[in-house]
Amino acid sequence: MRNWNIFSITSLVVAAWLSMSASIMWATDAAPGALVFFPSTAFMSNLPNGIAITGGSLIMVKFSSTKPNLTRKLYSAGARLVLPAGLTGCLKPPSTFH
């Protein structure tokens, strides 16, 4: 039997979360935006029309589109990992807390 340490458990949880998020994004395309991690130069030059860059950093770029199939278009352009962006979650906005 394997000894589970905190690093192993954390790695499994992160891998499961990334896999589920990417799978749900592929299946539903319901998020208002998408995060692409580690975009290559070739990917950035192959972006289809109708996709807007709405933010980014050194390791990721945030995209949005009013047209359907954003996730599939990003993967077909060469994205390595597409995760949902712009979801509000289940908490109320902080301004409603008094």
Image (cartoon, helix red, strand yellow):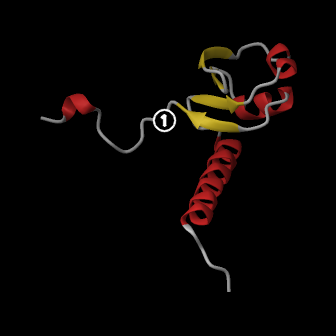
Location of residue 36 with respect to 15 vertically, above or below = above
Q: What residue would you read off at disc 1?
A: 87
Instruction: Classify residue 6 by image quadrant.
Output: bottom right
Q: Secondary structure at mark 1?
A: loop
Which quadrant: the N terminus? bottom right
Residue 10 placement, left or right of 91: right
**Residue at point 20%, 32% (across, down):** 96
Query: Residue 22: x and y, percent?
Result: 67, 45
Along the line of sight, which residue is nearer the eye, 45 or 73? 45
49 w.r.t. 6: above or below = above
Q: Quadrant of residue 62?
A: top right
Q: Quadrant of the C terminus?
A: top left
Amino acid marked by disc 1: Leu
Q: Is residue 67 above or below residue 5?
A: above
Expressed as whole percent of the image width and height from the top left, the position of residue 52 reads 66, 14
Pick whichever, 75 or 29, lies toward us. 75
Point 65% across, 42% down: residue: 25
Residue shown at the point (29%, 33%) measured from the top left:
93
